[in-house]
Amino acid sequence: MQNPWKTLSIKDIYDNPWIKVEEHQVLNPAGGEGIYGKVHFKNKAIGIVALDEQRNTWLVGQFRYPLNEWSWEIPEGGGSLASNPLESAQRELKEETGITAKKWTPMVRTHLSNSVSDEEGFVFLAEELTYGMAALEDTEADLKVKKLPFAEALQMVLDGNITDSLSVMGILRVARELNL
């Protein structure tokens, strides 16, 4: 389908190693002049639902600065735009939990907030797990890792106690795929 928007100009407003904010002067689909803000993400969002043979999974908890609150989530992080999302998922799972997996299944490809950003996210199911030591980054010094039955993680989503979008999508998709 052809783009009904016309871009008149683009101005960079803010730029850091993770995001760039742009202001677009546009003609909207009706032909009226307007403004559109766009947040360009410099990484892909990556999430992993790790599931062992007893149907346990792992959540990571950390204080999320933009929300000013604690958040329980599936293991997740960023992968460069040029990298393979699966390789990024494998790295993130090991980094945050120390877990490696022999079996990986893609579960979700999503655009996380497509009205204002171009951020693309991926969630994988990791199975046939092996356990080792985590290798946390400095920003993850307060990270807590929790092993729990997958059914409890699913209930946390249904109760609104997990609100992170990749986590919600990943847990719900795994529950549906595996009839859990």
Image (cartoon, grey):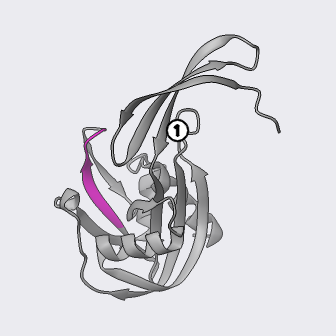
Residue 36: quadrant of the picture: top right
Q: The N terminus is located in which quarter?
A: top right
x, y percent for residue 58: 36, 70
Disc 1 target residue: 117
Asked if 75 appears above or below 159 in the picture, the reply is: below
Q: Is residue 85 visible?
A: yes
* Count of numbered tags: 1
Q: Is residue 115 left or right of residue 50?
A: right
Q: Is residue 142 above or below residue 98?
A: above
Q: Mark 1 belongs to which amino acid?
A: Ser
Q: Which residues are magenta?
A: 59-66
Our reading of the magenta stretch's main secondary structure is strand
When the figure is inspected, residue 129 is found, relative to residue 152, above or below; the finding is: below
Residue at the image point whose x is 49% and y is 77% from the top = 126
Q: Residue at x 41, y 55 (%)?
A: 156
The image quadrant of residue 104 is bottom right
Q: Relative to 40, does residue 25 appear above or below in the rendering?
A: above
Tag 1, which secondary structure? loop
Q: Position of residue 24 (x, y in %)?
A: 55, 24
Q: Quadrant of the C terminus?
A: bottom right
